[in-house]
Amino acid sequence: MKIPSFHLAFLLLLGSCVYSHHPEDEKAKGDTASDFSYTVPEEDQGSSPEDSFRTERRKIGLGKARTTSLDISIPAGILSVKGGTPDLAEVSIKYRKERRFLIKQDLTGDHLYAKLYMPKLEGLKEISDDRTICSIRLNEKVPMDVSLSMGAGKGKFDLGGLNLRTVSMSLGAGEFAVNLKSTPATSLKVNAGVGEATIDLSGKRKEELDAEFNCGIGTLRLILPRSAGVKVSLSGLIGNIDMGELVRKGNYYYNDAWETGSPRIRININGGIGDVKISMAD
């Protein structure tokens, strides 16, 4: 199901970021400039006055933390999240000057909680007049719980190389690609709004996974590992359903490895109007 053009009007975004510092923004302890950038596809670039934007690069250190919880919230724009830093996170962001980008941290014992977020704006400006571009690199070794919220736009979340424990996502209107291949995460919850989401759970797994998808309006594509035992339940869906290699037995759908494959993946897909397509990969 394609997204209506008016839902994507705000996606004509600008190019990559350059560093500048603004003292009025809340800054985490130990923040330093980091040398990386996010190149926006040409079709997503637009034209807006440069003096109406501010740009930043920020870093969040791990310190003595052995486990982490990370909360990322971006109301609208383009968001890229992937691994590739020895710190907890590195952020490169470009956003309108009327917004604020904030970082909060709290270290309790050896557990670090961090929140990266932009407070929402009131009114129609929230979805119709935004050109935020944000690229975030995360640590790949420290055990991590990730909560990710994006209101509207395009998101590419390449999380397969991270040492994830739990993942929670709230996806608004737009297009989202989520790579969780071979992740050790044992819990996944996705609340989807309007648009298209592709979520790749393929690859070899060592841990069992419980996943819940609460659908809105649009298309959900799931790629699952053929080597794992898969069980899927569906409820309240209106639209086209393609279960691929899965076979219905009673109220559930299973793959051939359910009885012999280990570990297992249990998936609940709830509500929504649109299409659900499940495919298997080696």
Image (tube, rainbow, N blue to C red):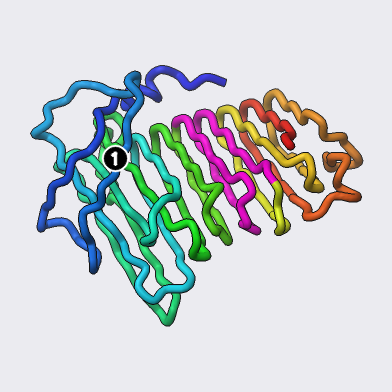
The majority secondary structure of the magenta stretch comes to strand
Drawn side of residue 219 relative to residue 102, left or right: right
Q: Is residue 7 shown in magenta?
A: no
* Residue, far bottom: 109
Q: Residue at x 47, y 73 (%)?
A: 66
Start and end of the magenta stretch? 174-203
Residue 16 at what x, y percent from top left? 25, 34
Residue denoted by label 1? 37
Tell which of 162 and 27 is nearer to you.
Answer: 162
Residue 138 at what x, y percent from top left? 41, 54
Q: Residue at x 43, y 37 (%)?
A: 155
**Residue 181 is drawn in which quadrant?**
top right
Image quadrant containing the N terminus: top right
Work out whether 42 lies above or below 23: above
Work out whether 141 lies above or below 240: below
**Residue 215 is drawn in which quadrant?**
top right
Callout 1 amino acid: Ser
Residue 145 at what x, y percent from top left? 51, 61
Drawn side of residue 140 relative to residue 72, left or right: right
Q: Residue at x 55, y 45 (%)?
A: 191
Residue 38 at what x, y percent from top left? 32, 37
Q: Is residue 184 shown in magenta?
A: yes
Drawn side of residue 10 relative to residue 188, left or right: left
Image quadrant containing the C terminus: top right
Q: Residue at x 90, y 49 (%)?
A: 259
Q: Secondary structure at mark 1?
A: loop
